[in-house]
Image: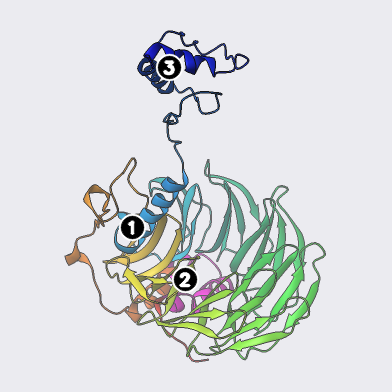
Amino acid sequence: MSTDSISSSFASNTPTSATVTQWPPFPRSVSPVRVVESMSSIDENSVELGHLPGALPTRKAKRPRPKSTHRSHFKHQYMVESAWRKGGRMKAKHITPDQGVVTSLHLTKKYIVVALDNAKIHIFDTQGEHLRTLQGHMMGVWAMVPWDNVLVSGGCDRDVRVWDMATGASVHTLQGHTSTVRCLKMANARTAISGSRDTTLRVWDLVSGTCTSVLIGHQASVRCLEIHGDMVVSGSYDTTAKIWSIKTGQCLRTLQGHFSQIYAIAFDGRKIATGSLDTSVRIWNPYDGTCLAILQGHTSLVGQLQMRNSTLVTGGSDGSVRVWSLETYEPIHRLAAHDNSVTSLQFDDLRVVSGGSDGRVKIWDLATGNLIRELTQPAEAVWRVAFESERCVVMASRTGRTIMEVWDFTPPADEDERPGTGSAAATTGLIIPHEQVLTGETNVAEDQRMLESEDDKVEGLDSKENEEMMDAYAENEVDDMKGIQHAP
């Protein structure tokens, strides 16, 4: 059969009704080779022929790959996890020339917020660049909570202050507490709740700058609180925890069972966990007040708690970190984490990050309980640690100075190499020379020097006020952070 007849046969088998105006028709006298060439040319111009009746089989055109695919997302997550395990880039910042104690640290989508016992609050961007310093408190800042650009803080001067972090402006000074403000949480963008050594909690309207209710019932200092919905749970040195309604200001129930002061609390709306100086952790039902379980194993104060789904992680002054199941109330992992007090603790679905007064920051595998790495070189003490999926902030004391270390685990941009090879292998850019790092035990004399310094700062106050201010430190505040344990 001639090529012309083959071509004519091909053309005659094509239904005449299948005409597509945007495609050029094939000449009846063209050869099969040229037909294929023409179809390939059309294919290169991103025209699909697969559904054309009578069209020859051909490959689909290549299309530009979307910027974000499942493959790229998986690769990104893999590289982030690899950096957490053996890489990361670190930037160190000198915060203050004196030995200031970091009392609170928050890492948000916009800011790194650091509060100190020298009455200052420092605002940084998420890369660690200093933006501004908030000054207004007269004494140490012992509690703060951010909400977008709003920051609420409280401390030894008894005031609750509302700030605009975007501008540094002081929006409100809320007065009413008669002693140190020790804990703060926000229920929503306009409502904050503070707990104080004056035994009360106060509910504040941040828009109007007014106190909407005073929650009275505790017999000693309110040390910690957590919020879920309309319920706020407070833990006190009177050994009890109380559940309150934010809307009505009424005490719904009192949780009794601990034999010593409550230092930490966690609440997810379904269960409450309280950590105490009596070395135990108790789990409570918030709706009827019953104690569901007593978790024992720590040998000293339990001052760190975090609850997530069906897992509870606790840290104590005995240096241990424990992972518990909230379904069976049994320990999953017992981690000999630090040589002294656990000063900071946080976990997510993959890892536990702990900081201790032994100056070390450690990362643990949540699933296995294995130590993944020590994140940074040993310091004199680690005050606070906070992290999110691709960033970690460490506040530590080095050579008598307060240092902020910002760790970045984000993969390099447009990086196609596998983690661990070539330029994709992120390295630890440690800025502080090794020979400058001190690893000695914390010095008890530092506590006395801090107390004496605070005496000088409040010299102008009358003796009663001075005694109340200094009491905040005497009640284990600085000692807890430095790992000095007091007898129950």
Quick one: 483 or 82, which is closer to the camera? 82
User: Can you say which quadrant of the picture contains the N terminus?
Assistant: top left
Q: Which residue is mark 3?
A: 6
Report the number of numbered marks. Answer: 3
**Of helix, strand and loop, which one carries label 3?**
helix
Residue lying furthest front in this view?
1
Left or right: residue 265 versus residue 121 is right
Amino acid type assigned to the residue bearing label 3 in the image: Ile
| Residue 31 in picture, x, y percent from top left | 38, 13
Q: Which residues are magenta?
A: 455-481
Q: Label 3 neighbourhood size at 10 Å, few (<14), some (14-19), many (20+)?
A: some
Q: Label 2 neighbourhood size at 10 Å, few (<14), some (14-19), many (20+)?
A: many
Amino acid type assigned to the residue bearing label 1 in the image: Ala
Residue 216: image tag: none
The Cα atoms of the two marked residues, 2 and 1, are separated by: 20 Å
Residue 142 in view of the camera: yes
Residue lying furthest left in this view?
435
- Residue at point 55%, 18% (across, down): 14
The Cα atoms of the two marked residues, 3 and 2, are separated by: 78 Å
Q: Which residue is mark 2?
A: 345
Q: Which residue is mark 1?
A: 83
Badge nearest the viewer, 3 or 1:
3
Based on the picture, tell me whether residue 187 belongs to the magenta stretch: no
Sooner in the amino-acid sequence: mark 3 or mark 2: 3
Is 361 located above or below residue 263 in the figure?
Answer: above
The Cα atoms of the two marked residues, 3 and 1, are separated by: 63 Å
